[in-house]
Amino acid sequence: MCGIIGIFNDKEAFSKVRTALAMLHNRGKDGFGIANEHEIQHHHDLKKFYPLKDKNMVGHVLHAVVDHIPQPIKKDGLLTANCEIYNWKKLNVKYRFNAKNDAELLLFFLDRFGPEKLDELDGVYAFAYWNKDTLYLARDILGEKPLWFSHNTDTFAFASEKKALEKIGFLDIQELNPRQIIKYNPKENKLEPLHREFFTYLPEHKGSFEVLKEKTARFLDKAIEKRIPEKKFGLLFSGGIDSTYLAKYFKDQGHDFTCYTAVLDSESGTVPPDLEAAQKVAKELGLKLKIKKIKLAEIPQYLQKIVPLIEDSNVVKVGVALTFYVACEMATEDGCKIIFSGLGSEEIFAGYERHKNSANINQECLSGLRKMYERDLYRDDVLTMDNSMELRLPFLDTQLIDYALKIPSKYKIRGEVTKYILREIALDKGIPKEFAFRKKTAAQYGSKFDYALGKLAKQQKFPSKSAYLKTFYPSHNVKLGVLFSSGKDSTAAAYIMKQQNYGLTCLIHIKSENPDSYMFQTAGTELVEMQAEAMGLPIIIQKTKGEKESELKDLEAAFKEAQKKYHIEGIVSGALFSTYQRDRIEKICDKLGLKVFLPLWHKPQDKHLQELIDHGFEIVLTAIAAEGLDKSWLGRKITIKDIERLQKLHKKLGLNVAGEGGEFESLVLDCPLFNKKIVLEKTQIIEEDKNRAHLVIKKAKLQTK
């Protein structure tokens, strides 16, 4: 793993590249490189570089794993890359390249084919390839290797880490969506995104469970084997099925490795679940295990380092980061340059609660994989790189994923057992059933670090863990556009993201002419501009006829406008259970390079409504269309008693408590996001029949709270 940087159309390109390389120095200890189109310099000391006079410049910091070839490197084109190509020797023979390592192979490959055949590369990468008047930026399809960029009317820049671009003064920095390739023309300062196809979960595999199990085991073992280095390495170890499987494989094959476990040193003397499990598995399997316990008083010091490092104050990300970072510290002290993790298994084999609640488990797996680059991979990359280590993730092997996504869902979840096929494979490999079928909690809970964050927040008198963590990283996490309907779900989703320190940049409303649209609410949407004013946010209103496919084009147009006007990095949606909505939003966002956030996804509906009332949301229903509901529900504020009535209707008639099945639509008059509240002054109820009616709002106003 390495670090890359590039700046185009900037007279200070050389000095800025050198400054950025200093910022990225932890990503490599084996030398630096700076190049323009005509000249390349390589040194171990940044002070030894003499200035290159050019407004276009690229740089590189090296972490050598396969041979020691400094970058940037040049043949027909110029390459600066952070890559680990596992099949580089095979491609070297196939195309008769005579490359000395994977980076050189990548250069020769791009010289011959450009970015057209990237799917032939088996590995992980982020690179910039510059040939004459064209620069290509790309990363592996899942986003294991990071890449950020910034483009304005004058300049273009990219780097492995966001903080490097911030250091040299760039604004509106975006993470490159792995399903995009950027094609950039330096002469015209024009950027063109090229779309890449992602995985699919269809067609489903046929055959017996035994056959599927055997094939899955082969793909998994190949994924592990190709990533094993010649020298000793580490394994992030929790005693769960994923890390236990990896440890058993390494042990059986005779590799030199150590397991690392990091937990909170509990004042009460209770043993964190992950420590108890790790010790038990290590003893049974004869594994070398190193443990580090962190006292509560030590955690703020770690947070001062970790939170700015991952550039995110999200509670879950930080909780996981603590256990990961401490484990990496131990591995670095032992001289390891590579550490393995079981990340990815939950997504491809269906290990989360949301998989159990899904009507289409493999579709849910695919959705989770799309989000991993934002949710997990950047965090884990910068944590390992800060310890001068490379992270390897066998469960995210593309060939394994391609096969695993098509395994019938009945072999992934059986009753309450998740990742069923993986657990059965583990039994075949000789892992005791007690360990193979252990139900594991998430890393932040199993290590007790989430508990520690809560305790520290309480000690410091903060209202939440998010508020406490924001003190370590005051910047917002990601700039979001809110797909806004005027109703409770989209408003609640925006509120949750705001509470988690994400920036709400604008509202995006689709005004549909079709009252029966599957995608967009219509009743009560007259007041969206007033709601935007109440929140102090700009709003984009996009009209649509509400026809099934054309409304998606209108949605895409609205997202594009929000990107252009407000530089949003992602979209937040209030979808609860509608895969129809979610999948279409995700596909559009993937196409546009936007991240997707669904904070309400699969949240219990009664709990969702209860929390809204508890947090001061004032909600009225604007339309009803279900047996058990009538016009008396319209126009009045929803109370706890109303939620209890909806629960009874759910038990009796199957009505969705949160109206997710179209039973009703809502309007938010007030909530913690509003600076002013909305007062309805004149309304009319139009009744179509006993169970179908809607509210027409004729007059409303904003009132100071």
Image (cartoon, rainbow, N blue to C red):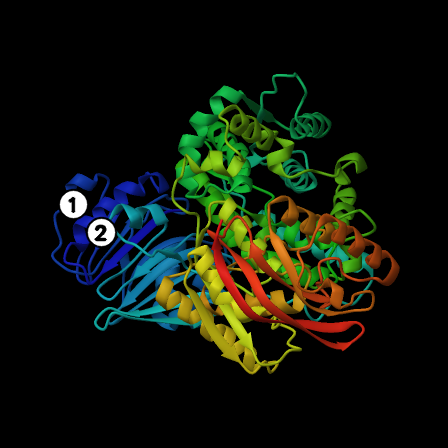
The one of 546 and 614 positioned closer to us in this rendering: 614
- The residue at which mark 1 appears reads as 49
Label located before the other in sequence (2 or 1): 2
Task: Give the secondary structure at mark 2.
Answer: strand
Asked if disc 2 and disc 1 are in contact, CB closer than 8 Å, the reply is yes
Spot occupied by residue 38 in the image (x, y as percentages of width and height): 17, 62
Spot occupied by residue 221 in the image (x, y as percentages of width and height): 65, 49
Q: On the rendered structure, is 643 left or right of 237?
A: right
Visible residue check, residue 218: yes
Task: Give the secondary structure at mark 1.
Answer: loop
Residue that lies at the very extreme toward the front in this rendered image: 681
Residue type at mark 2: give it: Ile
Q: Residue at x 54, y 71 (%)?
A: 526
The one of 622 and 260 positioned closer to us in this rendering: 622
Q: How many angstroms separate mark 2 from mark 1 (CA)? A: 8 Å
Visible residue check, residue 430: no
Quadrant for residue 62, please give it.
Answer: top left
Crowd around label 1: few <14 · some 14–19 · many ≥20 (10 Å): some
Crowd around label 2: few <14 · some 14–19 · many ≥20 (10 Å): many
Q: On the rendered structure, is 26 left or right of 678?
A: left
Spot occupied by residue 112 in the image (x, y as percentages of width and height): 36, 71
- The residue at which mark 2 appears reads as 34
Spot occupied by residue 375 in the image (x, y as percentages of width and height): 53, 50
- What label does residue 544 carry, if any? none
Q: On the rendered structure, is 53 left or right of 631?
A: left
Residue type at mark 1: give it: Phe
Q: Residue at x 60, y 29 (%)?
A: 451
The one of 198 and 322 positioned closer to us in this rendering: 322
Q: On the rendered structure, is 349 left or right of 520?
A: right
